[in-house]
Amino acid sequence: MVDFGFGLLASSRINLDLFDKEKFDSLAAAEPDVRKCIACGSCTAVCTAGKFTPTSLRAAIEELQNGRDEVAMNMLKGCQLCGKCTMVCPRGINTRHLILSIAKIYSKKK
Amino acid sequence: MRNNVLIIGGGPAGLEAGANLQRLGYNVLLVEHSNTLGGHLGKWDRLFPSGTPASGALDKLLGSMDGVKCFIDTEIQSINRLGKSYNVILSNGITVLADAVLVATGFDLFQAEKKEEYGYGIYDHVITNADLEQYFKTGLDARINAPKKIGFVHCVGSRDEKSGCRSCSKVCCATAVKQACEMKAAFPDAQIYCFYMDLRMFGRHYEDMYLEAQRDYGIRFIRGRVAEVSENIDGSLSVKAEDTVSSKPLKVSLDLLVLMAGMRPSVSGQRIGSLLGMQNEKDGYFEVLSEITSQQRSPIPGLFLAGAATGPKTLPDTLADARGAATQIDKYLSAIFPKAKDLKQLIKTAW
Amino acid sequence: MIYEGKQKIWSEYQKEIPDDHYFYVRSCIRQSFFPASEAAFLDITRNKLGKDIFETEHHTTCGGIAYHSDAIPQETVMTIIARQFALMAKYGYENYVCSCITSFGLYCETLETWREFPELQEKIAETLWKTCRLDFAKPKYIVHASDLIYHYRNQIAALAKHKLINVHTGEPLRVVEHIGCHYSKMFPSKGVGGAEYPYVLAGMVEACGGTVVDYPERRHCCGFGFRQYFIKANRGYSLSNTYKKFESMEPYHPDFIVTNCPGCPYFMDRWQYVIAEETGKTYGEGSHGIPVLTYEEMMGLVLGYDPWDLGLQTHQVGAEPLLDKMGIQYDPERKYLGAKGQDIGRPACPSCIK
């Protein structure tokens, strides 16, 4: 093996074929509102933790659906469950409850 | 003698205007170049937002046509101003003196093969919204083979200057959401994606339909335009887009891709326009006297317009537009041919 | 895949290619990467087909490499190009054929720019006169050398000594055709077959009996990308793009790749070695790579040229498995001998790829 001083890079492309439909369906069964998100960003705009840590429920929901579960989980780690996002969600999603359900279902290893 | 009104185009706008003008006491002549009445409505299965059967709506329109003389398979051969009227020669040899002309020539669906990167007509599992309606009607389409993953591409030939169409076609977002739900109902195990640029859920009940699509049908809406499609070795499709919400390029394999072909000015309508010396606006649709207050009148006296000839419209919009055109024609004929007023009074009394 | 659908698109993107009398300009980098290809082009067109292809030692680079790596401004590159065109006119030609894809793209771009901004054309004409004392001229037709070979494809196929057919199985060879980005992505109407389903190379392959492989990343760039490669720290991008293409074409088991750009065959050839060294992965049969040919090399093999005269020994990936499939006789002893029979040296032996 030769060291060329450069090498193959990891692609940033989302591979939607890796999306775990079964897992997301089980989340949606427990938490039907997760499908209602319209990615408006209200939750992220008011998030207390999000200003200092990479916390965003909007982005986490997107990442879960893009088959990037670990990235999503990291985006919810900083949540303080303060409930401000629940107040502003225009689709009436119980965001605190949703975050807890995501944690429950996605922290389980397959 | 009753005034003659010529309607060019036998789609929903022409039919609705025809029925209304006949009711108002005019002698209505409707000319349709194809071999059926109903236009695109005749090719559709169900209508958004509530899934009303298209055939029911069409039957209702056709059922109100009593007394309207309809010529199918007929072209306008020539049309010339003669005094207050238009002298019209039809391809079937009939000559008519029309006191008012309604252009209801509708739209053509954008030819999806023009978006070469989507491979319509090249890849085995790429179809259009119209193909899918045909499938819903007949249950037959070799390209639809128990799909497990389905994509819908919004804005195909709409909001796309390179395709020669900068404007929104208005109906495709709602059609995509409707068709996505119908496909989920037909193939409950399927995962369905809608690739959109903006979701234009402007009409009454549309937002409800969108919410149901998300919550009840589990449709995933991805904000990003599909940029390229290719075929995998197993015959499935490889689709590239950006998930602009997460700012990352995305790739997905799909078993079926449905292109939401938008509306373009109808080619046969353009021929009529040139016979009549009508002008187009920048978007290619016919010019109107005023886009706010006289949408159904052409700047040319005695010429009226209805439906998608003046830009993309939903079916209810088209029907309302046609009724508006009928009222405008009545107003015009009453003023130009005062006798018509008396006749109208007569009929009113008779009722 | 519906072949008729592609044919429909091909019929819409046909450009006018004059049959004869061309002013030929070479590519800077092809002369060092694949030195025999341009010689093969001239020999095929002049001696096999009897065409008038003129070249002069006075022509220079088009300036494309410097332009695309931000070293010179557009006005400078346009003046260089204006000089080439002026030479063409000076020697009495009006059809211009170039060997390089980047040059071709740049010529198209320049002509379009002049069309849209006549005042800029005026300025360049003036600069040309001041610097070179040459009269400004524009070609009547501008084609890439692959357009011309495409145009002659049936004549070449009629003279074929070997077809693109596996002599052992009788099956058509599976060919990946790869078009340089600057051939038609900027101006689809200037390329045979357009940009989404280019036909220029596919047409040659079909005419010679081969079959074209359409794989998902067919349209993707080879990875050269100019500054992606020039700076070592960026080379990972270049390599990764090539890797993506090979991963995508792998399931189709292509027999070889044919290209019409100077950079593409180089990177698709050399990066196979780097990928093999870094990951241990090879894409051909039995630890071989997939041979990557220029269109002149492909047509040269078809016409019965000796593989070593075509310069196939300058490739990283050995062409021998392909030669065997095509039933071409070759002398392994001659592989590393130069034109005068001298030893030209051997490449270091890679550890993973044959």
Image (spheres, coloured by chain):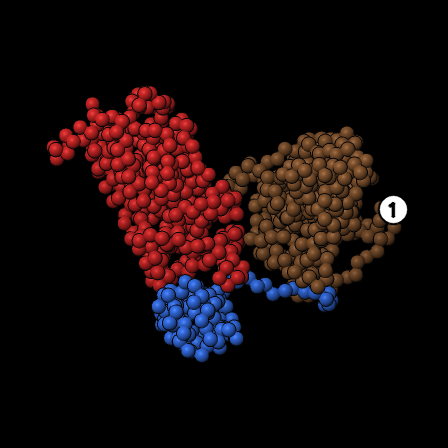
Chain ID of residue with mark 1? C
Q: Which residue has dot 1 on it? A: C340
Q: Residue furthest left?
A: B350
Give me the residue at 31% from left, 48% from top. B47
Q: Residue C211, percent across and down?
A: 60, 45
Q: Is residue B267 above or below residue C289?
A: above
Quadrant into which the C terminus of chain C falls = bottom right
In the image, taking residue C238 as reference, residue C330 lies left or right, namely: right
Q: Colour of chain A?
A: blue
| B128 or B224, nearer to the observer | B224
Q: Residue B130, percent across and down?
A: 38, 45
Q: Which chain does the brown colour mark?
A: C
Q: Which chain does the red colour mark?
A: B
Give me the residue at 75% from left, 34% from top. C136
Q: Quadrant of residue B62?
A: top left
Q: Residue C308, percent across and down?
A: 78, 47
Label 1 CA crowd tier, 10 Å (few <14, some 14–19, many 20+): few
Q: Is residue C345 visible?
A: yes
Q: Is residue B256 visible?
A: no
Give me the residue at 68% from left, 32% from top. C140
Q: Residue C311, percent across and down?
A: 77, 48
In the image, taking residue C298 as reference, residue A91 lies left or right, namely: left
Element under label 1? Answer: loop
In the image, taking residue C92 as reference, residue C291 lies left or right, namely: left
Number of numbered labels in the structure image: 1
Give me the residue at 70% from left, 56% from top. C227
Query: Looking at numbered disc 1 in the image, what kind of residue is underneath it?
Result: Lys
| B103 or B194, nearer to the observer | B103
